[in-house]
Image (tube, rainbow, N blue to C red):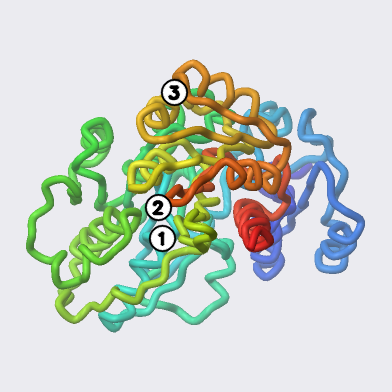
Amino acid sequence: MKSNKEYPKLIVGAGSTGESVAEYFQKSNIPFIIIDEFLSTERLLQLKNKFGDCVRSPVSFDQSFSEPFSQVILSPGVSPQREIVKNRINQIPITNDIALFLANAKKPCIGITGSNGKSTTCLLLQEVLRQGGYSSLIGGNFGTPALTLLDQPLPDFYILELSSFQLEIAHSYTIAIGAILNVTDDHLDRHGSYHEYLLCKMQLALHAKRVIVSGDDEILMNETKKRNPHIYPFYEKNHPKTFYIDIGFDKQPFHNKKNLLAVCEIINGLGIKLDFSKVMLNNFEGLPHRFENIITINGVTFINDSKGTNPGCVIEAVRYVNQPIILLLGGQTKNTDLRPLAKVCSEKVMFTVCFGQDASRIQQVMQEYNVYCYSKPTVSEATRCAYARAINGDSILFSPAGASFDQYSGGYSMRGNDFCSTVYNLI
């Protein structure tokens, strides 16, 4: 009779992350099974050509898996509360690709998490390191699955963008630097409450040798101190004026300033002696769909902030716009508390236009704060509705405060492209 350790690993979820785990096991001659609830015919054929009979689909995640396995490797899109994970026999261990990567990485790793700004901070850090003469690779929640980085030439540093879904599962690892940029309401449809969401983010503080955290956020500072004494805080409100002038801080857009301060503390935490006066970031291009000034038509400015997928991100964007604002909101709001956003809208927004799955929920909350809210089924119709009511000097801000998968399989970038296409058709 086989012991548990002799049974194959069970990879739950066959998206890009699950596929990267399967590739890693295949190269390492580790037996595995990869399963998914639903795969298109094309995707199933692709995976079977690659992994043969190791692929199982369709397999329900709402019941126990019938075949024996030694370990669960969970994809970030699959909740650990699904029955296939929750009711595994004898509490068979569960892990994910991030933990596997960190156990095998041969160079220092920097983990970056937060409700907003993760991706931009990763790119800023990579650019600052590059100008300082250091190579780095970015992966994790940002584009490239972490395990695929092991196939590339060794860099000086690995930079991992880490979501709450990834931090929720990864345990028993050590990481050189953990940066927690901010924590505001997000993904409450999965985590259930802000407290549980915060606890997922705090996993990074538990496993990092040094933690970079916003010193302006009292709750975040206190929670981090409970878990790790080695803290390097960054301050936006009362930051020391020692390095930021040299790196073009004042010329950065509002959403990059906090990220840049965090990057400077990450560099300090790594012990790198970098001459910031030689770092040039004036031409740094941020991510697409993050507060992009698209075009002005008949005096009406259109801003694409499709990457604004939670209320905290949208609040910052609204506060930054100086012109009268028409705000487009919609998608999947993930059970987040919309009231703080509605309060800000009551002070700064002329009216809102909502769309998508949670349009009625958004409309109800806005009305509670006396913010008028039109409702349209699609982004395109919402955009045209806003423009029809705008006048010279107004700004139409597309910052939805929700995820996009109710209407766009390609995520916020596809949604942002749809908004831009609609705008250009107005000319």
Residue 120's disc number:
1
Which residue is under mark 3?
A: 339
Q: Earlier in the sequence, mark 3 or mark 2?
A: 2
Residue found at the far top of this picture: 368
| Coordinates of residue 131 in the picture (x, y in percent) | 29, 81
Describe the element under mark 2 as helix, strand or loop. loop
Q: Residues within 10 Å of mark 1 (few under 14, many from 20)?
A: many
Compare residues 407 and 327 and report the one nearer the observer.
327
| For the residues bearing labels 3 and 2, Cβ distance under 8 angstroms | no
Amino acid type, residue under disc 1 in the picture: Thr
Tell me the element at label 3.
helix
At horizontal 15% and vertical 72% (from top left) the residue drawn is 246
* Amino acid at dot 3: Arg
Would you say 286 lies left or right of 268 here? Answer: right
Total marks drawn?
A: 3
- The answer to whether marks 1 and 2 mark residues whose Cβ atoms lie closer than 8 Å is yes
Residue 74 visible from this viewpoint: no
Q: Residue at x 87, y 43 (%)?
A: 58
Mark in front: 3 vs 2: 3
Q: Is residue 198 left or right of residue 243?
A: right
Q: Nearer the viewer, mark 3 or mark 1?
A: 3
Query: Residue 297 sits in which quadrant?
Result: bottom right
**Disc 3/disc 1 C-alpha distance (Å):** 27 Å
Amino acid on which the number 2 mark rests in the picture:
Gly
In this rendering, does residue 144 appear at all? yes
Q: Which residue is mark 2?
A: 117
- Please tell me whether residue 275 is drawn above or below residue 321 in the rendered image: below
* Left or right of residue 162, residue 264 in this image: left
Distance from the alpha carbon under mark 1 to that under mark 2? 5 Å
Say above or below: 197 vs 238: above
